[in-house]
């Protein structure tokens, strides 16, 4: 399609010999084709979203018994990550020191998250703290201009730092998936829980899961 | 009736504007692109609300596939070259101890290949075979995973040597969401034994709610 103006066609008699007038227009179509081909290639090969990370701090392994912090029974909850994305949790009875009846729940919003938030709130209210909202609630309040950004940040860190807040012990069963671990760590972030630990499961607790599962109504 | 002659109009359109746009987009994508490194195994990372981006430099990545294989990668070519030499030395010592007949040395070519490779997941005695494979055929090479159990913990050696070579190195665990927990536990235990108590889990971005 390159356009070359015809015309001209030999010299006219008598007139000055004119140089041929060439059109300056170049056909861009192949160039555009190439351009779009390359765009398509780069669009398909590019990976836009950078992976995110979640930082985990594990305790140093060989700590002596004295250095280990004793956790108040009333403050702790133990989460056992079981098969099929299920969670079995139990509290320790303060007076007897025995585990209370385990409860089965799951990763849904009304499941473990509600439990953690309620329990945390309960503990914080008991300790006369008037600050117990979850991060999503606080963010919503900030969005509605009820609190300032500083206030929001202050409250979030305040809940995490509160010594009376909930302490979560996470134990994963061998049948659990990696996804479950990440999900539960996610819940820690969402529920504003500053103190949690990933601990190895004991055989007693594995049995606990089994009995809890067998008692589960179908 | 005489035919009405429709004046012929040129069909050619001015392409300049379109070219401009096309090349603008092309430039954008060329600059924004970051080629996906060739992975030994495809990982479907779990999603989380975590918003911390993964650092680009000084990373060592331990990949756990959904079928419980473990892969290892250290970033940085110069580090990798040093790493494989060191590990080969150590392996030799180990071999002397257990009086194994397989002696491992790596040729300069193999070392070069290793430094160009991303993650790998073979036991040491099979690493030479993997390195002899052309990079194009490497995808077909069956990688059994790095042994990390208590009997033969090669992963621990890789981690330890990597930390000696590059003391700035940070550890990231990239697990498939369906990876079994015992393997993850084993990897974490290995890390802790090698005094790595702080590490990252690589996750995908997700919107707030975790659908189930």
Image: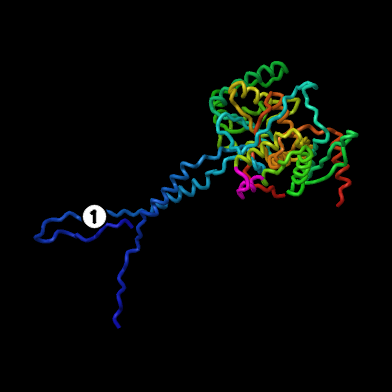
Task: Please name the residue that numbered disc 1 is placed on.
Answer: A22
Residue drawn at 57 percent across, 32 percent down: B117
Residue projecting furthest to the left: A14
Residue A118 visible here? yes
- Residue A24, how many percent across, how many down? 27, 53
Magenta stretch: includes residue A144: yes
Residue A64, image quadrant: top right
- Residue A79, how many percent across, how many down? 79, 39
Mark 1: which secondary structure? loop
- Residue B28, how many percent across, how many down? 45, 45
- Residue B210, how many percent across, how many down? 69, 47
Residue A74, image quadrant: top right
- Specify start and end residues of the magenta stretch as a single range: A138-148
> Where does the N terminus of chain B fall, quadrant-wise?
bottom left
Q: In this view, does B64 lie above or below A40?
A: above
Residue drawn at 61 percent across, 50 percent down: A144
- Foreground: B110 or B147? B147
Q: In this view, does B189 lie above or below B50?
A: above
Residue A197 visible here? no
Magenta stretch: includes residue B160: no
Label 1: how many residues lie within 10 Å, few (<14), some (14-19) or many (20+)? few
Residue drawn at 85 percent across, 36 percent down: A92
- Foreground: B3 or A166? A166
Residue projecting furthest to the right: A96
- Foreground: A96 or A47? A96
């Amino acid at each position: 399609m390159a356009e070359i103006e015809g015309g001209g066609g030999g010299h006219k008699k008598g007139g000055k010999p004119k140089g041929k007038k060439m059109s300056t227009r170049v056909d861009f179509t192949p160039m555009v084709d190439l351009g779009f081909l390359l765009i398509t290639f780069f669009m398909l090969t590019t990976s836009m979203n950078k992976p995110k990370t979640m930082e985990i701090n594990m305790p140093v392994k060989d700590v002596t018994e004295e250095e280990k912090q004793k956790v108040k029974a009333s403050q702790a909850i133990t989460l056992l990550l079981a098969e099929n994305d299920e969670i079995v949790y139990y509290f320790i009875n303060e007076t007897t020191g025995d585990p209370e009846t385990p409860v089965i729940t799951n990763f849904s919003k009304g499941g473990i998250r509600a439990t953690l938030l309620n329990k945390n709130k309960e503990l914080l209210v008991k300790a006369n703290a008037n600050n117990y909202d979850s991060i999503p609630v606080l963010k919503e309040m900030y969005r509605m201009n009820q609190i300032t950004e500083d206030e929001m940040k202050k409250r979030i860190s305040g809940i995490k730092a509160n010594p009376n807040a909930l302490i979560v012990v996470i134990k994963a069963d061998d049948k659990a998936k990696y996804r479950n671990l990440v999900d539960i760590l996610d819940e820690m972030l969402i529920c504003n829980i500053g103190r949690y630990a990933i601990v190895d499961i004991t055989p007693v607790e594995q049995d606990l899961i089994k009995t809890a599962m067998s008692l589960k109504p179908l | 009736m005489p035919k009405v002659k429709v004046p012929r109009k040129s069909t050619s359109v001015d392409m300049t504007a379109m070219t401009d746009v096309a090349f603008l987009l092309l430039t954008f994508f060329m600059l924004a692109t970051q080629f996906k490194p060739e992975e030994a195994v495809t990982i479907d990372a779990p999603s989380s609300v975590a918003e911390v981006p993964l650092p680009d430099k000084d990373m060592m990545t331990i990949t756990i596939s959904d079928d419980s294989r473990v892969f290892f990668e250290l970033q940085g070519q110069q580090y990798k070259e040093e790493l494989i030499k060191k590990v080969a030395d150590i392996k030799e010592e180990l071999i002397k101890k257990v009086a194994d007949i397989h002696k491992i040395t790596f040729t300069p070519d193999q070392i070069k290949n290793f430094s160009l490779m991303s993650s790998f997941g073979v036991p040491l005695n099979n690493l030479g075979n993997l390195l002899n494979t052309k990079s194009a055929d490497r995808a077909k090479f069956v990688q059994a995973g790095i042994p990390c159990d208590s009997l033969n913990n090669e992963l621990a050696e890789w981690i330890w040597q990597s930390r000696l070579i590059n003391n700035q190195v940070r550890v990231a665990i990239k697990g498939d969401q369906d990876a079994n927990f015992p393997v993850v536990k084993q990897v974490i235990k290995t890390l802790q034994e090698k005094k790595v108590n702080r590490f990252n889990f690589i996750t995908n971005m997700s919107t707030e709610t975790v659908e189930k």
